[in-house]
Amino acid sequence: MKTQDGRLYVIAGASRSGKTAWTARQVKKARRIFAWDPEAQWCELPGWRKVTTRKQLLEAAQKPGAQRVAYVAGGSLAGEFDFWAGCVMYAGRYVEPLEAIAEELADVTTPSKAPGNWGILVRRGLKRGITLRCISQRWSEADKTAFGNASDYVVFRQSSGDDAAYLARKTRIAIEEINGLAPLQFVHMDALTGGIQRGKLSF
């Protein structure tokens, strides 16, 4: 089955800058979506199903059709994240295309090459029609493979000058623009075209 390629969003910002709220609005109409939800945020939203075991997650990954699944795992986060990524790849490749949200990537990846199933998902998932929305407060401490494969950069207010400088260097968004962001303001760059949009969340 031929599918349209997915996109990979790198979403960066300090705590409470608007990352998750922006992402929630972007996926509001998504038909089929899986979230890595270490802080149990997505599972509290209307229409989402909370799963807490590998068995439940695997069953959801094998099921076709519309669903919103938030995996809230205990134990070793790195191991559970690897399992989640493998399930997402399976679900998107062999069942139906989907979207996936990976929260707090710096907690489960490092600036080196993307590990295990997550690396496979990042490198091969887009051409299988999987769209990835990758969220982190500090991308200097997170996965460089995801950053390198990004089709979109969404940058909110940063917590430090070092974080702003890192993002400016990696995204080519001017550091003055990043440093000038107020809470809930963001810059969205299409990495494939260089086009930039600016916005602010309102509630």
Image (cartoon, grey):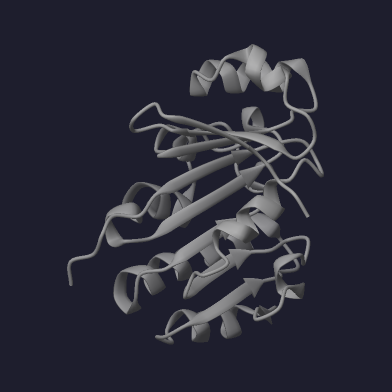
How many numbered marks have been drawn onto this rendered protein structure?
A: 0
Going by the picture, which residue comes out furthest to the left? 2
Q: Is residue 95 left or right of residue 81?
A: left
**Considering the image in quadrants, where does the C terminus appear?**
bottom right
Residue sitting at x 71%, y 69%: 73
Residue at (48% x, 35% y) in the render? 147
Q: Position of 138 compared to 28: left or right?
A: right
Q: From the viewer's perspective, tell me whether residue 55 is left or right of residue 88.
A: right
Is residue 183 positioned above or below 8 on the image?
Answer: above
Task: Tell me the quarter of the picture where residue 23 sits.
Answer: bottom right
Q: Quadrant of residue 26?
A: bottom right
Name the side, left or right, on which 110 lies relative to 17: left
Q: What is the quadrant of the N terminus in the image? A: bottom left
Identify the image quadrant of residue 159. top right
Q: Residue 186: percent from the left, percent from the top?
A: 65, 35
**Residue at the location (50% across, 33% down)?**
144
Give the percent coordinates (x, y) of residue 120. 38, 53
- Residue 175, given in percent of the width and then of the height, sits at 63, 14
> Which residue corresponds to the image point at 57% horizontal and 67% vertical from the top-left?
28
